[in-house]
Image (tube, rainbow, N blue to C red):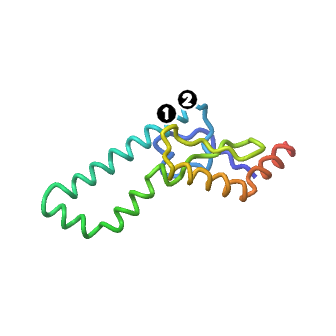
Amino acid sequence: GIDFIGNVEGKDVPYGACDVLVCDGFTGNILLKTAEGVSKFVMKQISAMFKSDLIGKIAGVLVLKKAKAMKKRFDVKEYGGAPFLGLAKPVIKAHGNSDARALKNAIHQAITYAETGVIEEIEKTMQKA
């Protein structure tokens, strides 16, 4: 079933406070754009720290593999987009500035989303309600 937890504070969203966050499009877009901007800013600051001097460069070499993994995890192009829930067919909302890699991943998202059976589960749940 659905475990409605009520209102969620914006500061708790990145920590997995809920599996699905429902909000109007304007608020959702503000939340996403802010998170993306902060993520990009923090990644640039970390990169600059590792390039700033010899000690930073040595430290950067030591954490390079983990830093690349973190960068990939925060890269919006890796996800491609997010599904619109409640529609009969998979629809993925991608960025207006998506490049070929982001679009490829958005298509992959649509295929994966369709294969999970989420659409059918939502439909069954709504019919019961």
Which residue is more in the foreground, 16 or 45?
Answer: 45
Q: Tell me how many marks there are.
A: 2
Left or right, 51 with reference to 12: left
Residue for point 32% across, 48% down: 42
Mark 1 surroundings: few (<14), some (14-19) or many (≥20) residues within 10 A: few
What quarter of the picture does the C terminus occupy? top right
Secondary structure of the residue carrying numbered label 2: helix
Q: Is 66 on the left or on the right of 127, as rendered? A: left
Q: Distance between the residues labelled 1 and 2?
A: 6 Å
Q: In this view, does 46 lie above or below 129?
A: below
Q: Do the residues labelled 1 and 2 touch (CB within 8 Å)?
A: yes
* Image coords of residue 27 (percent x, y): 54, 31
Q: Which amino acid does label 1 sit on?
A: Ile
Q: In front here: 125 or 95?
A: 95
Q: Residue 128 carries which label?
A: none
Residue on which disc 2 sits: 26
Give how far across and how far down residue 122 sits, in percent.
Answer: 77, 48
Q: 73 or 3, which is in the foreground?
A: 73
Q: Whole-percent x and y of residue 25?
A: 59, 32
Residue type at the position of mark 2: Phe
Q: Residue at x 26, y 70 (%)?
A: 62
Q: Name the residue under label 1.
A: 30
- Helix, strand or loop at mark 1: helix
Furthest residue to the front? 100
